Amino acid sequence: MDAKAHRLANAGLDCRREAIAEFLGTFILVFAGTGAVMVNKISAGSITHLGISFVFGAVVTAMIYALGHISGAHFNPAVTLGFWASGFFPKYKVLPYILAQCAGAIAASQLLLITLGEVASLGATVPLNGNWLQSLILETVLTFILMFVILGSGLDRRAHIGFAGIAIGLTVALEAAFLGQITGASMNPARSLGPALIGGIWEHHWVYWVAPIWGAQLAVAVYRELSNGFRDFN
């Protein structure tokens, strides 16, 4: 095997391991987060909306610290595309990451359906009262904020080391707390895809792909300006 072929083989192996980490992280995120939505319904509201928001934030924080050193802890196609647009993530890893994230979310929703039953629409995200434009705008803003925090706390080397997981998890929790009842506060196409596919709930599902991707790309563009074209990161 020549040197170029060896490098390509090693790159493929590394990407496989990272994709597995993304699968597991997204699986656990959806299993815990949407599982909390379902258990809240089963238990007549014992977890509460704020409790569900806490679960989402806590599981994101935990997975960042558990898997961030392996894959970067994206667990979200919008975040992966955002990192790629920023120039800090190679193109050849984009599709494997997104496929792994979607597969993890789908597997989690399937397991929840088997174990808990068809409860609370499996935690699917749908616009309140069918108002897709409202959700489109709000999900864009929510994902902008999330990606902005990710870039500022997790990618910018000037940030305090070690606090990214807490900052990102708290952002997910607070956004879920104040807008989860309106849009579902997905901010994550994979998180929305799992319940939609397994539960057959496709109402305005496109919003939960378009808005997070738009929001993340906008955050990259804004942070690029704030960081001198990302040159201030080093």
Image (cartoon, rainbow, N blue to C red):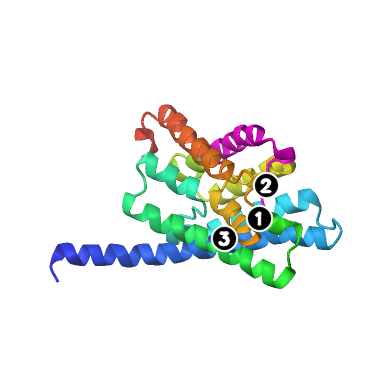
The residue to which callout 3 is attached is 105
**Which residue is label 1 attached to?**
58
Label 2 crowd (10 A; few <14 / some 14-19 / many >=20)? many
* Front label number (1 vs 3): 3
Q: Main secondary structure of the magenta part?
A: helix
Query: Residue 173 bears which disc, if any?
Result: 2
Q: At x 48% / y 46%, what residue is drawn? A: 79
Given contact means CB atoms under 8 Å apart, are the residues at marks 1 and 2 in contact? yes
The region drawn magenta spans 124-148
Please tell me which residue lies in front, 121 or 186. 121
Amino acid tagged 2: Ala
Measured Cα–Cα span from mark 1 to mark 3: 17 Å
Task: Give the CA separation, mark 2 to mark 3.
Answer: 19 Å
Give x and y (percent) for residue 174: 69, 42
Q: How many residues crowd around disc 3 within 10 Å: few (fewer than 14), some, or many (20 or more)?
A: many
Position of 187 with respect to 225 (left or right) is right
Along the viewing direction, whichever of 33 and 66 lies nearer the viewer: 33
Query: Which amino acid type is shown beneath numbered disc 1?
Result: Ala
Secondary structure category for the residue under label 3: helix
- Inspect the image, locate mark 3, and give the three-letter code of the amino acid beneath it: Ala
Q: Is residue 137 above or below residue 124?
A: above
Q: Which mark is residue 82?
A: none
Camera-near label (2 vs 3) is: 3
Q: Is residue 126 magenta?
A: yes
Asked if residue 222 lies left or right of residue 108, the reply is left
